[in-house]
Image (cartoon, grey):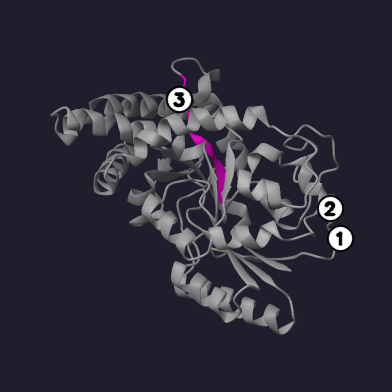
Amino acid sequence: MTNVLVAPDETGNGVPRAAAGCHYSDVTALGSAVEASAPLEGLPPDRIEVRTISIRNETGGPRRQDEIDAEIIAIVELELGRDRDVLVHVLDASKTGLPAVTRQAARHAAALAPGRVRVIVDACQFRGSISRLRQDLADGFVVALTGSKFVAGPPFSGALLVPAAFAEELAVRSDVPAGLAEYSAGQDWPAALRQRMRFGFKSELNLGLGLRWVAALAHLDRYVEIDESRQSLIKEQFVRLVRSRIDAVKGISLHQHDEGDYLGSCAMVPMTVMNGAGAFASFEECQNIQLSMRGLSGGPICHVGQAVRLGSRTVLRVAASAPDVIGVSQAMSAGQSLHQAFAPIESRLDVFFHKLSAVLYHLRGA
């Protein structure tokens, strides 16, 4: 099989290893010690080839969407010609909010060889619409999610949504790699599927995963009750408020390559960081800024997204979460205007940018 992985530098750090059928860390989800980068048991090293597609050019600017779509379809056609099955990766939103591979292109690729071309939607940021994810499942796409990130649940609360028809196919497969038992417990699977799969689970229950999802669903259940038009209104307002404060802080900016309507839909703003000499700050300097914002320089704890390299520059990200959207929506339902409902968030943003300015000043000694 050929796994076509999109934007590996803007997804999780361990994704390229996992995409190759290898252990992405030296400890599995169920606590077993393994060798990172080693193939899972039952998966020969040459069984999976990984092809990667970039969503940015050498300078960090976003590639045109039609170019990305054309490249993915060309790769699928090439790999089918080599008599290989293909897994197509659709990135719902990258670490900087960029989408990659349109649903139209994904449907076209899947139709080239039904049953041999599969599509997985990486919605782990969980910043897209619920209705679109429902449509993905209806189209036969597998969807990967996490309860952390936007949902603001505990880390490592991952889930895979499998369309019913594909689940039926899985239930009769006998060649499920044994190494997956290090990552998946019996109760992780729906009862109907678990009872039919010929797969030796080493553990019946991953209690930690279940409890993390209980916490995440407490936010998600309230979020999905909000009309999607109101969700969009609140997310877009958050981005406007962030952008209105960026220019007041010396050393950060919204780079022209990061402009786009997708910022509002994702409620995320990537901030390009400059150093004291007016050049792009290094990745290491940005990491220090992020760490300092969490409390090392005193003052309130302010969380900012991890540093991401984009060509020659590095960005830090400020984003809203599902609890933010829930809080604003509840205030609006109680009769407050959008501006009034945003007052607590505006106050926190003022604190955030005040501390960011102080941290930049402190680290640069000027």
Is 202 on the left or on the right of 313, as rendered?
right
Q: How many marks?
A: 3
List the single residue furthest toward the top.
Answer: 298
Question: Mark 1: few, some, or many residues within 10 Å (few <14, many ≥20)?
Answer: few
In space, the residues marked 2 and 1 are separated at their CA atoms by 7 Å
Viewport quadrant of the N terminus: bottom right
Residue 307 belongs to magenta span: yes
Q: Secondary structure at mark 3?
A: loop
Q: How far across and down, in percent of the image, does residue 138 sit?
A: 46, 62
Vertical order, 209 against 234 (above or below): above
**Numbered circle sitting on residue 302:** 3
The magenta region covers 301-309
Amino acid type, label 1: Pro
In space, the residues marked 3 and 2 are separated at their CA atoms by 39 Å
Single out the mark in the foreground, 3 or 2: 2
Q: Quadrant of residue 34?
A: top right
Q: Quadrant of residue 311?
A: bottom right
Q: Secondary structure at mark 1?
A: loop
Amino acid type, label 3: Cys
* Badge 2 or badge 1: first in the primary sequence: 2
**Numbered circle sitting on residue 44:** 1
Question: Mark 2: few, some, or many residues within 10 Å (few <14, many ≥20)?
Answer: many
Q: Secondary structure at mark 2?
A: loop
- Residue at 52 percent across and 23 percent down: it is 294
Vertical order, 238 against 255 (above or below): above
Q: How far across and down, in percent of the image, does residue 134 sit?
A: 42, 55
- Residue at 81 percent across and 65 percent down: it is 47
Are discs 2 and 1 less than 8 Å apart at CB?
Answer: yes
- Residue at 46 percent across and 33 percent down: it is 217
